[in-house]
Image: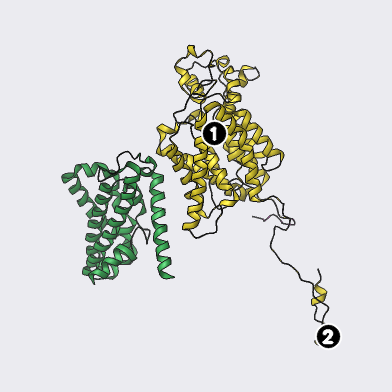
Chain colours: A yellow, B green
Amino acid sequence: MSTENNVDTGKPDEKPAAIPRLHLSSSPHVRSSLSVKMIMLVVIIAMVPSLVTSIVFFGINAALVTAVCIVAAVGAEYGANLLLKRGQTIGDLSAIVTGMLVAFNLPPSIPLWIAAIGSVFAIVVAKMVFGGLGCNFINPALAGRAFLMASYPAQMTSFSTPNFGSISGLTDAASSSAVDAISSATPLTAIQNAFADGSYVASDFATALKNLFYGSVGGCVGETSALALLIGGVFLIAIKAVDIRIPAAFILTTFALFWLTNGTGTYFTVDSIITPTFHILAGGLFLGAFFMATDPVTSPITPRGRLIFGVGCGALTFVIRKYGGYPEGVSYAILLMNLVAPLIERYTRPKIYGEVKKHG
Amino acid sequence: MIAKELKRGIITENPILILALGLCPALAVSTSVKNGLGMGLASMFVLACSNVIISIIKAWIPEKVRIPCYIVIIATFVSILQLLIKAYTPALDSQLGIFIPLIVVNCMILGRAEAYASKNNPVHALIDGFVMGLGFTVALLILSGIREFLGSNKLLDLLVIPGFQPMTAFILAPGGFFVIALVMGVINYAQRKKGA
């Protein structure tokens, strides 16, 4: 901008006027005041409602699992930084978020040492060896969950009965004398079994929707209460910590696909939306859609890319839940989409101003 | 000279951990020490024998069809080995299964034939086959030891720590990748430290 000061006037003895100091830096030039630490703090605050409801429904176990996971995650990050001789990064609070998310993905009755292993794996193997925050290619918390699912399948899939409810959510605590075989299964297993043996009747599952919404059903620490997750998610979207595209595309895709295969044979009746509503409220869908698929490190940054990412997560969740061997597919769906996130970014890169489409 | 060759095969040019050759069988069979040892010794046998034969007849192998020639020689020894294992250790045969015939396409063996045996005399080729096979075996023992301990809390089928609940993931495929990556990482770190 002030290059005239540098123009060689041809008169070497004539000193140019004081050259203004120009600071040169590469983009981005416009920075938001939001720091990593602030975002992490906001995410932690957004997770508090889920933690509170979880403690209400699962008692002190939920708090213990969460505490152990956080301590293990922060300790692992501290230790890894020491070993790898990097600067300490535990101050950015991302390890606390990862620890909480690991805990949210574990059953409340899990032995605490298993929870700690999951946290350490998430931090050390999925995050620190790739270079720390920002360099991991998959969501660390989900990697921790996947590792535990492969290592301790029995402990990872035994769920305790919540206070004020039943594991499947199909029967209330008051009427739990009428417990049938179905009530020991989680909501997703229950609806899958009903579909598998052809005994699905929409009205049977309608009563469970309320329990699923409030969270008095069996499940992982942070996933059961759709209401609490919704509060946290809306908070994150409202303060723009999370782009609404990913959770909206994720949830709507799952809803639409289950609506198309809703089992009643009709599409525009009240009964036809029970299956899809059940599926988006049950399991870890809200947790995954609001808190894990939106991880800024492992999801695409382009707006169109985020839509594709969300739709992909939703479609994979549907495929795994409907046709896969596991009752729950959210975590694997997000992990798989994490892997293709760079590819999505490449193909949805916005056109640079003035760029001409290449021919042939 | 023997000590130097041993060091080359086991440490400085370890086929799995340094040259990154023969990773498929290393990942596939390192689920227990027994399998790792069996695979390592089997590969060592094939490698040493094929190295010698290739070194002897290298003058008569036409340049353009050398790879098929090597493969035929290697496959001959693998067939011999497979019949021997089937006859004398049927348990190992059922454990290693398809990975015994697949020794034919183990890139460590083809790699040594191409890079060493076809350029050196039979004695040196035999020594190279032996030390490289030993390096392969040692690497497999390290990997399978870690995986068997963490994945099933056993070493050579004996319980290690009573009460420790093993992490099944380590004897599954992902565990193989984790362990081999971490071991290679540690070795690279040690080498860099030594070089610096």
Q: Give the side of residue B53 with respect to residue A186, left or right.
A: left
Q: Give the side of residue A336 with respect to residue B179, left or right.
A: right
| Residue A36 percent location from the top left of the image | 64, 50
* Residue A14 disc label: 2
> Where A141 falls versus B183 (above or below)?
above
The residue range painted magenta reads A353-359
Chain on which label 2 sits? A
| Residue A156 percent location from the top left of the image | 44, 33
Residue, disc 1: A317
Going from N to C along the chain, the mark reached first, 2 or 1, is 2
Q: Nearer the viewer, residue A360 or B171?
A: B171
Give the spatial CA distance, label 2 vs label 1.
73 Å
Q: Residue furthest bottom?
A: A13
Residue A244 seen in render: no
| Residue A58 percent location from the top left of the image | 52, 28
Which quadrant of the figure has residue A157? top left
Residue A37 seen in render: yes
| Residue A217 percent location from the top left of the image | 53, 24
Q: Is residue A356 magenta?
A: yes
How many numbered dots are placed on residues in this image?
Answer: 2
Check the picture and name the quadrant holding the N terminus of chain A.
bottom right
Chain on which label 1 sits? A
Q: Is residue A241 magenta?
A: no
Point 48% across, 50% down: residue = A124
Which quadrant of the figure has residue A277? top right
Indicate the amino acid at tag 1.
Thr
> Where A74 falls versus A226 (above or below)?
below
